[in-house]
């Protein structure tokens, strides 16, 4: 992966492999607010959520897991997807 950085006054735009991204603090704040409704949004909280998704869903840690058990992980994945879509500056 090749990353170029456009040095703007606010340094919010980056280009990786020819795709430009603009980090928007309002969108990021909204992402955090949505996540805070169902999970711990601290640095450790994000790590635990990602580990939980890996252990519980991908590795099928517990085959008897219910939808209610994994609902926070699924909500996190949806919020992360929505946030990542907001940082693209082009329709690529």
Image (tube, grey):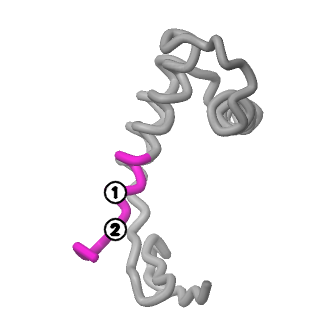
The one of 46 and 8 positioned closer to us in this rendering: 46
Q: In this view, which residue lies farthest toward the left?
A: 91
- Neighbor class of circle 2 (other Cα within 10 Å; few <14, some 14-19, many 20+) is some
Quadrant housing the C terminus: bottom left
The one of 69 and 62 positioned closer to us in this rendering: 62
Q: Position of residue 37 (x, y in %)?
A: 47, 18
Residue highlighted by disc 1? 85
Quadrant housing the N terminus: bottom right
* Side of 24 relative to 67 (left or right): left
Q: Secondary structure at mark 2?
A: loop
- Number of numbered tags placed on the structure image: 2
- Residue at the location (43% across, 76% down)? 13
Residue highlighted by disc 2? 88
- Residue at the location (43% across, 63% down)? 23
Quarter of the image for residue 87 reads: bottom left
Q: Secondary structure at mark 1?
A: helix
Q: Position of residue 35 (x, y in %)?
A: 49, 28
Q: Position of residue 26 (x, y in %)?
A: 36, 47
Q: Are marks 2 and 1 in contact (CB under 8 Å)?
A: yes
- Residue range highlighted in magenta: 81-92
- Neighbor class of circle 1 (other Cα within 10 Å; few <14, some 14-19, many 20+) is few
Alpha carbon distance from label 2 to label 1: 6 Å
């Amino acid at each position: 992966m090749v990353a170029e950085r456009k040095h703007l006054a606010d340094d919010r735009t980056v280009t990786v492999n020819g795709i430009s991204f603009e980090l928007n603090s309002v969108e990021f704040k909204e992402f955090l607010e949505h996540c805070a409704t169902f999970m711990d949004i601290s640095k450790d909280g994000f790590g635990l959520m990602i580990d939980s998704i890996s252990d519980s869903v991908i590795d099928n840690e517990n085959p008897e897991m219910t939808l209610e058990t994994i609902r926070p992980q699924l909500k996190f994945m949806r919020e992360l997807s929505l946030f990542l879509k907001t940082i693209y500056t082009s329709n690529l």
